[in-house]
Image (cartoon, rainbow, N blue to C red):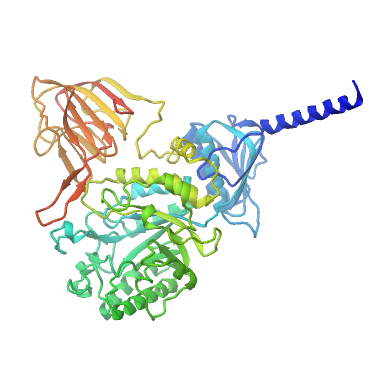
Amino acid sequence: MTLRSFIRTGVVASLLSAAALVQAANPKPFTVPEVSNWRGSEGSLSIPDGARVSYSDPRLESIARQFAQDYTTLTGRSLEVAKAAKPSKGDIAFSLKQNKKASPESYTVDIADHVTITAPAEQGARWGASTLLQLFDQSAELPKGHIADAPAYGFRGFQLDAGRKYIPLDYLYKLIDVMSYYKLNELNLHLNDNGFTYFYDDDWDKTQAAFRLESETFPGLTARDGSYSKKDFRDFQRYALSRGVEVIPEIDVPAHSLAFTRFRPSIGSTPEEYGKDHLNIMSDETYGFIDSLFTEYLAGPDPVFVGSRFNIGTDEYSNRDSIVVEKFRYFTDRYIRFAENYGKKAMVWGSLTHAKGQQPVKVDNVEMIVWSNGFANPQEMHDLGYQLVSMPDQILYIVPHAGYYHDYLDTRDIYDTWAPHDFRGFTFEEGDPQIVGGMFAVWNDHPTNGVTVRDVHHRIMHALPTVAAKNWSGTKVTVPFDEFSTKSASLSEAPGVNYLATFGPEQRDILDVASVMPSSSLPVDEIGYDYTVEFDIDGAAETKGTALFETPEATFWISNPVTGTLGYSRDDKLYYLRHDVRPGEKSHIKIQGDKDALRFYLNGKLVDDMNIRWWRQNENSRKIAEQRTLVFPLKNTGKFKSKISNLRVSNYLR
């Protein structure tokens, strides 16, 4: 062999060896949001029995313990928690390392013979834990490598309307777990609002209105169809903070205020002026009322509003003349400063283009949610100096079955074309420090439309991974949308959370029971969309109001309380199915449920298609779309007399 050929062979061998090393490095693992930087190594790490979670600083103890609990929930395996233990093979170690230049939400994860999560602050450590849990959610083995991650935007939120529809706290706790798992850190909770009069005979006195907090200052103000006690609300906010999520309480004034004007009519605008859902901002009495109301939740050594922010509302008030515009601007400025006097950062809904005038409104350190460019021109608000939260309504508003905005968000459009610097018509430089982040929203504009909390959650989870990804990464997402959509759907909602009541695609047939006994429990609590439930009935005489299957949230009746036929109920709605069980009569029942409808088959024939129903209270009212879905309850059986056999529950429509 000549020298030249020897050298050439050696070079080629070296190049091939280098290429093999490159190919052997682990590719970037999938997470939502995706990590900013990944440097892959070779091989993988399995967590052995007896592995530990350690923490180097007392501030990390609760995070380490929560991680260990979530790990057990996901995997069924336990981890010992220890302080400052030297990591052994397979251990997971949390540590803080000061870095004044780094975001407090940044973190690194090193996966080698053990795992080290390092962050400059507790929040970063929490997000490192979420990333690691998502890896365990997909595989028992971790790819070896190095993660360096930080968000592009500090405000990554979701806004939920609890004013028009009561949202129970037990669900809100689950929602916080979900948000934390996907690194969303702000929940704007809209605590008061009212429906539209045109669904209620154009009668303000019949129109739905609610304020959801306990009030000792104004006994009788609190909604009777669902509310939060001060203690429970404090506890909820503190729990959210422990998971890295801030709850932003919102009391929306001076519009959307029918709950307040119904309680005290003397502070309301008359219908001839702006409508009864508008406060009379010309009256000193109104300011006295709002001062007292806000003080009740902001003041004292243990205020009801725990977090750093308070949203004072200020959206969609009348602008019919310069007098009311200037007074509205005065009102807005007054309550921004009022919140700040109690140590809160004020948030407002953008309305100052709609209410353009001369009266100064405080700008410094105020966050403005820009939802409509007509109400608040993004460029104008930016030039004034506001910190802007991006939530363009045409792409990020969900209003279930309203016929306007979205029923489900167009996630492909959001993923491929939107990031928080884009206000749809006004696009700023990515990284502009005044664009603090973005949100998406669910508004329950039509309170009587049959949409349950389960249905609200179904819409949230359809959108949440996508919005979380874009708020964290901005335009720097690298995974194609189809791949993102498929892989994100395989992740859990959060450790221990399955509020969709779904099962993986590999679990097709969920339950098969030869004989269902009365007053018993089944091993599956419920089944969510899409599902099929089938069973046989050998009929006996049943008493009205006899349940067949039930959970605390829903009941499937073998004899409903009103007509005695089959039926189902959830929230405050009862629906009848056209079949009554009779003694000695045998029948085969099949129920199919998806996100839009429930279908009832009797002996193989479709009898009731409970899809969207349009109805109105009377001929003068506007039509409303009513949803009649059901997450099917299975947990407990009722005291029925009929024989129920061949129960089969499937995780698909068949």
Nearer the observer, 538 or 421: 421
Residue at 18%, 22% in the rendered image = 604
* Apparent side of residue 385 relative to residue 322 in the rendered image (left or right): right
Nearer the observer, 63 or 373: 373
Where residue 553 sits, quadrant-wise, is top left
- Can you see residue 178? no
Residue at 16%, 39% in the rendered image = 575
Residue at 43%, 58% in the rendered image = 424
Nearer the observer, 241 or 389: 389
Where residue 347 sits, quadrant-wise, is bottom left
* Apparent side of residue 233 relative to residue 41 in the rendered image (left or right): left
- Can you see residue 77? yes
Q: How many numbered marks have been drawn onto this rendered protein structure?
A: 0
**Which percent across, then down, holds residue 346?**
43, 68
The N terminus: image quadrant: top right
- The vertical placement of 648 against 102, above or below, is above
**Which percent across, then down, holds residue 126?**
54, 48
The C terminus: image quadrant: top left
* Apparent side of residue 362 relative to residue 612 in the rendered image (left or right): right
**Which percent across, then down, holds residue 229?**
31, 58
**Which percent across, then down, holds residue 209?**
22, 60
- The vertical placement of 179 against 219, above or below, is above
- The vertical placement of 424 against 64, above or below, is below
